[in-house]
Amino acid sequence: MGKALLLRLHRWVALAFALPLLAVILTGVILSFEPIAVQQAIRPGSVTVRTVEGLLQRYDPRGAARTLSLRPSENTLAIGRGQGGGAVTVDLATGEPVTRDATTVSDIFGTARQIHERLLLRAGWLVTASTIAMLSLVVLGVLMGWPRLRNTLPGWHKGAAWFLLPLVVLSPLTGLLLALGISFTPGPRAADASGSPLTLAEAVQVLAVEHDLSSLSWIRPLGRTLAARVVEDGEMRTYALTREGAVPMARNWPRLIHEGTWGGLALAVLNLVTSVALLGLLITGIWIWARRRLRRASGRQRLAKAA
C-alpha cells in the first residue's frame, strides 16, 4: 500500500469522524481536570462517621438508601434513595439540602462525561466507532513512516504525533477497552452472600476503620456487595465492604489509565497533556486539509482567469 493511499485514507477517516471525535476529545480535555480538581479539593479529616451517620438518620430514616456520593469541590454529600427514589444532596457545612440554583463544577464534569460516553443521544455506538477510527488514524500514521521534521504546520502535526505516540495510543485504546467492558479484572464477588447485605450506615462504619471519609468518591452496590471508591495516595482505589472489613478489589487498569486517576497529580497532568495533544492533532489535521483545498481552489481560479 503506497504512502499516497495511506495519506488519503488517513485524511478521509479523520474527516468522516471529525465531529464525533471533536466532541469526544474536547470533553476528554474537560474531564482531564476532574482528578486534579478532586485531589486539590480534599480536606483530610473534614468528613467524619458521626457527620455521615447523622445525615443518614435525618434523610434516610428507613435505611432504604444504597448510594453515597461525596463532592469535595462543593462540600456536598448525595444520598441515593434507591431505585426511582432519586437523591438528596446535602451541604456538609450546614446539613441542609442544597438548592440547585447554579451550575456546579461537578455538574460540568457530569455533563461532559455524558457527552464523552454517549454524546447525550444514547449514541455510545458512535463513540465506540469514533474511538476505533482514532486508533485507525494512529495505525495509518505509523504505516506512513517516520516524517521529515520541519518548522511547518504539517511538520509539527507529524512530529507531535510521533513523539507522543505512546500517549496517543493509550488514550483511545483504554477508552475502547472500557466501552467493550474489558477490564482484565474478575467481576465483583458476592461478599456476605450467606448473610444479610450491609446497610449503608454499616458500610460507612466499615470504611472509616482504615480510611478517611473525606477521600470518599462514592459507595454503591456492585452485585450483592456494597463497594466504595476512595482517593488513596493519588489513586482511585475500589474496596468491597464486608463485615470483615474493607477488602481491596482488583485494579481496573484501563479505567485508571484512561481517566488519569492513578499515580497522583503528576500523571493526572500527563493525562491532561494527552487530551490536549489529541485535540491539537485533530484540529491541525483538519486545518491542513482545509488549507490545501483552499489553495487548490485559488489556483484553479487563477488558471481560469489566465485562460
Image (cartoon, rainbow, N blue to C red):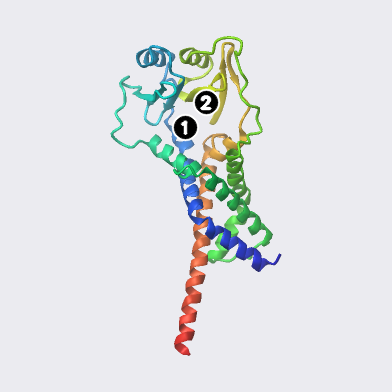
Q: Position of residue 277 (x, y in %)?
A: 53, 52
Whichever of labels 2 and 1 marks the residue nearer the N terminus, that label is 1
The numbered mark at residue 39 is 1
The numbered mark at residue 240 is none
**Image height of 171 relative to 240, above or below:** below
Please state which of residues 187 and 45 is positioned toward the viewer in this rendering: 187
- Element under disc 1: helix
Q: Residue at x 35, y 23 (%)?
A: 90
Q: Residue at x 47, y 16 (%)?
A: 200
Q: CA distance from mark 2 to mark 1?
A: 14 Å
Residue 128 visible in this rendered orientation of the protein: yes
Residue 33 visible in this rendered orientation of the protein: no
Residue kind at label 2, given as amino acid type: Arg
**Image height of 234 relative to 65, above or below:** below
Image-based side of 137 in relation to 272, left or right? right
Q: Residue furthest right?
A: 1
**Image height of 202 relative to 179, above or below:** above
Quadrant location of residue 267? top right
Q: Position of residue 257 (x, y in %)?
A: 58, 38
The numbered mark at residue 229 is 2
Q: Residue at x 55, y 58 (%)?
A: 14
Residue kind at label 1, given as amino acid type: Gln
- Element under disc 2: strand
Q: Position of residue 161 (x, y in %)?
A: 59, 56
Which quadrant, please, contains the N terminus? bottom right
